[in-house]
Image (tube, rainbow, N blue to C red):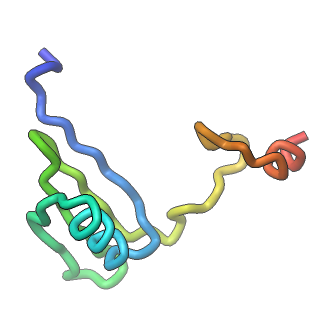
Amino acid sequence: MLTQARIAAIVPVSDVEAAVRFYGDTLGLRLKERRSDLPENREAEFEAGDGTLLVYESVGAWRRVRGVRPARSEDREWDRDRR
């Protein structure tokens, strides 16, 4: 069942080059493929154990979505703004 499934995580990033340095150089994941055939749709795919990590450049990456609180937020200003 799922214990045997290959898992893929897809992560939007604001800067693919910075993500490649972080996931590849800092965390040591193996870069499998980079796709930059479309300047507005750059991607990088990493091998992560038995799974895959795909990062893609997104204009909206890192924007706070109104009404969705970050999972581990200690951001009091965010809480105040939501009231």
Height in image: 21 above or below 81?
A: below
Q: In screen coordinates, is 79 left or right of 9? A: right
Height in image: 54 above or below 5?
A: below
Q: In screen coordinates, is 13 left or right of 46? A: right
Q: Quadrant of residue 38?
A: bottom left
- Depth check: give the residue in front, 22 or 52: 22
Q: Quadrant of residue 21?
A: bottom left
Residue at the spot x=12%, y=34% of the render?
6
Q: Quadrant of residue 73?
A: top right
Residue projecting furthest to the top: 1
Residue at the spot x=31%, y=51% of the render?
10
Where does residue 19 sit, x and y in percent of width and height? 34, 69
Where does residue 30 sit, x and y in percent of width and height? 12, 61
In the rendered image, the quadrant that contains the N terminus is: top left
Q: In screen coordinates, is 55 left or right of 67? A: left
- Depth check: give the residue in front, 21 or 70: 21
